[in-house]
Amino acid sequence: MYRFDHFNFNVLDLEKSLAFYKEALGLEPVRVNDKPDFTIIYLGDHKTDFKLELTYLKDRTEPYDLGEIEYHLALIADDFDAAHRHHEEMGCICFENPSMGIYFIEDPDGYWIEILPDR
């Protein structure tokens, strides 16, 4: 058997990404692995065991090529309308699909995160 543990995003500016994930989604560090060449910080939601891994390569200066961004992370919002208002105020909503009742936010590195209502 298998079970999910984490998903990784490589980030260019670790502090900016940490601030974004804290403000936008309430995700906070649950584990840190700091080495001379890289830092890996696992973010958790304090509700599930799933973690988002942020990998920061310390000598990286160029933005990551995310291709056509045909993949994404999805989170369920306890209060979808409040989450939407908050993300609207942050200016990070990059796509909305009202007919499906979902929207996406974009992090500082261009990764998309789907926001779902709690159904």
Image (cartoon, rainbow, N blue to C red):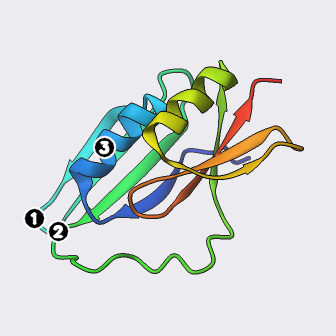
Q: Residue at x 29, y 40 (%)?
A: 19
Rendered image: mark on residue 72 = none
Q: Nearer the viewer, residue 65 or 55?
A: 65
| Residue that protrudes farthest toward the right in the picture | 99
Q: Residue at x 43, y 28 (%)?
A: 26
What percent of the width, then of the height, locates residue 73?
A: 61, 51
Which residue is labeled 1 in the image? 36
When the figure is inspected, residue 36 is found, relative to residue 5, above or below; the finding is below
When the figure is inspected, residue 83 is found, relative to residue 18, above or below; the finding is above
The amino acid at mark 2 is Lys
Q: Nearer the viewer, residue 108 or 48?
A: 108
Q: What is the CA distance from the residue labelled 1 to the residue labelled 2?
A: 8 Å
What percent of the width, then of the height, locates residue 11?
A: 34, 62
What percent of the width, then of the height, locates residue 30?
A: 34, 33
Q: Of circles 1 and 3, which is in front?
A: 3
Whether tag 1 and tag 2 are in contact, CB under 8 A, the answer is yes
The amino acid at mark 3 is Leu
**Helix, strand or loop for disc 3:** helix
Q: Nearer the viewer, residue 102 or 41?
A: 102
- Of pointers 3 and 2, the one earlier in the residue sequence: 3
Rendered image: mark on residue 58 = 2
When the figure is inspected, residue 26 is found, relative to residue 73, above or below; the finding is above
Which residue is labeled 3 in the image? 18
**Helix, strand or loop for disc 2:** loop
When the figure is inspected, residue 109 is found, relative to residue 51, above or below; the finding is below
Characterize the local packing of mark 2: few (<14), some (14-19) or many (20 or more) Cα atoms within 10 angstroms.
Answer: some
